[in-house]
Amino acid sequence: MNFIEFRQQFFDLACFNIHQVYAWKPDFDRNSLTRWTKKAYLIRLRQGYFAFPEYKSRADYALYFANRIYRPSYISLHSALSFYGMIPESVVQITSVTSLKTAMFINDFGQYSYKSLKHAFMFGYEQKPMNDGRTFLFATPEKALVDLLYLYPFYNSRKEIEELRLDEGYLHEGLNMDVLQGYCTRLKTKALDDRLKLLLNIYGL
């Protein structure tokens, strides 16, 4: 198999999986992917998923791949809270939620962490546009906060919530409180309701 021919076929996809390769050429020799990865012609994102190294220099592709290599999923939790300026820290991992099992992948584009959420709770996200017309799924600020309180039960005390160092200005001016309360109502868990009430009380919301 000629890599130039392979690249012409798959480069515009940005990332691809082995099933797409076999759909193109059923007799494809999978060892070619191993060989090309060792030569740095390809980057292995996770087992069976690959990307081209040229995309490392393109904006937002690390986020785009988060959606593509483990589906269904959307970016949320600490990554989304950092993006919106709700927490002060920059986040090393790209954090997502998924209706699949909890998982983590590490590759040349970054560390990808996925927390498992019930399928019925997979809502509250939107499509973020990229410069080349692609999109990726990203939690609204309200859902990112709800996901965090739901999936991290230790945020159940004043001390733990204050250590998040949430931006008070954003909480008061950037959050849609009706949307936030509506998301909590849809999840229908008392523990989440209690954590949210505590957070709202701490920040005078």
Image (spheres, helix red, strand yellow):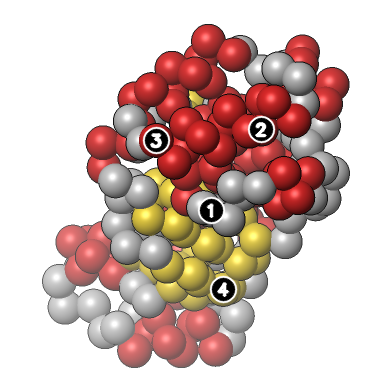
Q: Which numbered dot is residue 190? A: 3
- Quadrant in the rendering for residue 184: top left
Q: Which residue is mark 4?
A: 106
Q: CA distance from mark 2 to mark 3?
A: 14 Å
Q: Earlier in the sequence, mark 2 or mark 4?
A: 4
- Mark number displayed over residue 199: 2
Residue type at numbered disc 4: Ile
N-terminal of the pair, mark 4 or mark 3, is: 4
Q: Could you give the CA–CA distance between mark 2 and mark 1, rounded to whole angstroms?
A: 14 Å
Q: How far apart, in angstroms, are the residues tagged by discs 4 and 1?
A: 22 Å
Residue appearing at x 55%, y 89% in the figure = 38
Q: Are marks 1 and 3 in contact (CB under 8 Å)?
A: no
Mark 4, mark 3: which one is toward the viewer?
3
**Residue that numbered label 1 is attached to:** 152
Q: Quadrant of the C terminus?
A: top right
Answer few, some or many: residues within 10 Å of disc 4's Cα (few below 14, many 20 plus, some between 14 and 19). few
**Cα–Cα gap, marks 1 and 3:** 14 Å
Residue 159 pos. (x, y %) = 75, 50
